[in-house]
Image: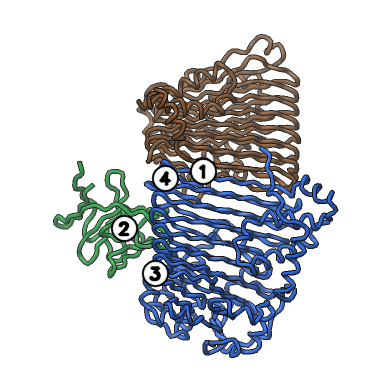
Amino acid sequence: MSASATAASAFTIESVKAFSAKRREPEFLLERRLKALALWNEMPLPGKQDEFWRRVKLPTLDFEALAKRASSEKALKLSALEAAGSKAGVFFGTLDAAIAQRADLLKKYWATKVYPAGDAGGIARRGGKFHALNQTLFDTGYVLHVPKNASLKEPLEARFTSQSGTDGLYPHNLIVLEDGAEATLIEIHESAPGAVGLSVPQAEVILGAGAKLHYLLLQNVGSEIIHIGAHRVVLGAKAFANFPSAHLGSTISKSFLELEMEGEGSKGVLYGLYYGLGQQKLHMDTWQHHIAPGCTTDLMFKGVLDDRAMAVYRGMIHLEPAAQKTDAYQQNRTLLLSDDATIHSIPGLEILANDVKCTHGSTAGQIDQNMLFYLLSRGVRIFDARKMVMDGFFEEVIVKFDLPQVVEPLRNLIDVKIAAKR
Amino acid sequence: MPEFHKVCKKSDVPLTKGKTVLVADKRIAVFNLAGTFYAIDDGCTHADASLAEGGLIVEECAVECPWHGAQFDIKTGKAKTLPAVEPVATYRTRVTGDDVEVEV
Amino acid sequence: MIHENEKIKRTPDLVAETAAKANEIGKEYKFGFHDSEQHLFRTKKGLSKEVVAEISEQKKEPQWMRDFRLKALDIYFQKPMPNWGGDLTGIDFDNITYYLRPTDKQYSNWDMVPEDIKKTYEKLGIPEEERKFLGGVGAQYDSEVVYHNIRKDLEDKGVLFLSPEEGILQHGDLFREHFGKIIPPADNKFAALNSAVWSGGSFIYVPKGLKVDIPLQAYFRINARDMGQFERTLIIVDEGASVHYVEGCSAPVYSSDSLHSAVVEIVVKKGGRCQYTTIQNWSNNVYNLVTKRAMAYADATMIWVDGNIGSKLTMKYPAIYLMEPGARGEVLSIAFAGKGQHQDAGAKIVHCAPNTNSVITSKSISKQGGRTSYRGLMKVLDGAENCKSHVVCDALLLDEKSRSDTYPYIEVDAEKVTIEHEASVSKVSEEQLFYLQSRGIGEADATKMIVAGFIEPLVKELPMEYAVEMNRLIELELEGSVG
């Protein structure tokens, strides 16, 4: 820390080269870092003119200071792969393990198809400069590869923890399921007490034909962390992705959650819940992109906001002209528990194919007074009654997480937040 | 507790526009209307443009937002025309010597 | 998850009946006619301080209005073109004449209107007998109110139905109290343009407690080559009063593009009611960029009924600010986009006070590569408790080349509110088509009936002759689109 006054900028070609060399990375990874670096240096910070960022009020960030990263042992903890899995040729390990053992995977997929390095077109339109930040500075992350027709029964877990002190965490993750493969992965983002700084994860997920993935995302970072996440799933023909997410932590968070329906007959389920207290600002940006015909996407985001919390839900269903026989659904529901809570809901549709069924809806309101009254009249205290209503409200989303090892902790986290209001 | 903060010199405030100052994390616009100083929130309640960049309409004691033309009374903070509806906050000012002070 | 289309409400007999009525009312609807041009005064093409000053001079305006126009012109030049919405690159601003005055005076009855102008109106199909039923007709021809007749009894009751030029000169204080306060020139680039070069439109004042039971109407028309239309309307409904204003228009076809950039400002005071109905059917070379906004006070009701059938590109988002408790706002919007058309329409409602209600219903139909976009804002400000709002946007895509977009913005800053928004996009339901065809109705007619049922909630809000015209227009649009 004390040497930082004379330290070189982390955002120069020399620094990035040095960093990559220290980590013994292959040439292609360095190339991709440099492409991202060029984009980072070129792009301005997103501001009021940028539709996707207009409502996000980021404080001034000292990126040089935040380029300091915590050691990756503390930052990432992976669950162990079961024996059956390794026998079937599955790879599940850290980025560094992948560099050592499966560089071929990285070469083929890393920052290529899903979030291409240095791409100012597709990604810049949405996450832009922060995508480039992750791809320049990444030093941790997990890689999961499941070969053709292999099926992983045991869920895998990757747990990212921002450390105490001020730093940045830039995990870059890769999931590739070949044709017919199946897996379940839980990705958790949290913080040690006293953690301050940036958390900017990026996940690239590719599903082959007929592959099935349950990708459970839990964001519960500390109250001094700014979290900007990007997660994109590309689905091949008849692939299936269940991608539920919970957005509970951070002081400001913006999460891009994206489905690219590339293969005919694929299906994506994108459910989310958010619960804002204090002065939290929770932003969720979803993208249901129907490229091939006959695909289905089903999205439901439900949130509760209290105190002076604010949420911005932006959702877009975009159908290309070839996407006939699409079934796309998008719902956003928010309960406002206080007068100063705010919701901005911007569900969108861009439909260029006609033989489709596309609907979206958005509601915002208070707790159903009849329901509350019913409970109160049966002797339930007001605090418990409200909690019951909220639990019931979130249940529809919680069931999508489907695993007791996730559902129980999730319910606890929500209960802890509710209890903080007592 | 609100207290007076020195924000700028009298001569820093032009006569037809305002001056944006930052006090305790708030963006405030200071105006000089025929010798009397007024201070209001700098952000227009419609779309948060800087009111200090707007034009002063002296005879109406109002400022016009440069982005969409909403007018605010700089004494009361009240929105006089659409597209603004909500008023801006006003702050007490005083002049000490050459300095303008705003109570925040 | 299944979206269902509107239930079919029309029978084959009703379709035939409707077509028969259309024939009764007027000649078969024809686009694309224009009369030889007869204009006594034209400003030169393009826009400058001199042009704006000349306009003010010609109208003999007071100094404040002249200053207002010139200031608006500066704002217009400074503002950039919008980077959202439709494609405005085809407008050649330098090649437009911004003001035209065909006659020197107003006429008080139909017989005194010059022949060629009369012919234009007759082609639009307004039979002589109907004129007596209308409250008063301010007929606009190329930027100036030519024919103006206020029914005597309305005049006696204190209703003002004038051109804005007359409004400034005869009721200056009332006019100035509200003019430009609802839509300031800086609001957007095209409001600034209108504020600089506006000409014609309506100025309406309805005194306290008076309910005008006959719709007030006006007709618009673009005639001259490269002509722009910049009418400016201001409607003030005093406490407890009520009025329904209707505008509909038609324009001829030209090879270079026309620009229509109107501004409508409305104030509905306590307990008042105002309905503003528009059927827009500009020919397919017109750019129609309109700013319309109303303020509704305590217990007042404001209703926009907006039909967009014509034009190459329309950008129009009627807005209502619900200022005080009890205010109610409603927007009913139909958009139809055929080949080469883009209807970018919608609504904006801002709940500024508690206990306010709003409803937005938007129906759109696209065919042959047309594009409809719904762009809306539903905003509830802090402190506006107990508000209810319901938004429904449905879109029909009649073929695979067409496009529909929905961009709703919902911003809720208060608690104890109920805000609901639903939208769906689909094609004509195969089940419904099958049902009708199995009863011997051909596919073309069946499609027409289903589409008529789809837009019926809006059509039933129109005055009868408009309802008939609207149905006829949609039928004509659909002809040739099936099979």
In the rendered image, which residue does mark 3 sit on?
Answer: C208
In the rendered image, which residue does mark 1 sit on?
Answer: A345
The image quarter in which residue B54 lies: bottom left
Q: Colour of chain B?
A: green
Q: Residues within 10 Å of mark 3 (few under 14, many from 20)?
A: some
Calculate the distance from the C-alpha at mark 2 to the C-alpha at mark 4. Answer: 24 Å
Residue type (three-letter) at the residue carrying disc 4:
Asn
Q: Residues within 10 Å of mark 2 (few under 14, many from 20)?
A: some
Q: Residues within 10 Å of mark 1 (few under 14, many from 20)?
A: many
Relative side of C463 to A420, left or right: right
**Outermost residue to the top:** A83
Say the numbered circle drawn on residue B78. 2
Give the structural element (helix, strand or loop) at label 3: loop
Residue type (three-letter) at the residue carrying disc 3:
Lys
Give the structural element (helix, strand or loop) at label 2: loop
In the rendered image, which residue does mark 4 sit on?
Answer: C386
Q: Nearer the viewer, mark 2 or mark 4?
A: 4
Say the numbered circle drawn on residue C416. none
The image quarter in which residue A123 lies: top right
Q: Nearer the viewer, residue A203 or A6?
A: A203
Q: From the top left corner, tell me how far across and down residue B68 is, in percent.
A: 43, 61
Q: Quadrant of the N terminus of chain C?
A: top right
Q: Nearer the viewer, residue C301 or A64?
A: C301
Q: Nearer the viewer, mark 2 or mark 3?
A: 3
User: Dot 4 falls on which chain?
Assistant: C
Residue type (three-letter) at the residue carrying disc 2:
Lys
Calculate the distance from the C-alpha at mark 2 to the C-alpha at mark 1. Answer: 28 Å
Calculate the distance from the C-alpha at mark 1 to the C-alpha at mark 3. Answer: 40 Å
Residue type (three-letter) at the residue carrying disc 1:
Ser
Chain with colour brown in the figure: A
Q: Nearer the viewer, mark 1 or mark 4?
A: 4
Q: From the top left corner, tell me how far across and down residue C82 is, in percent.
A: 54, 60
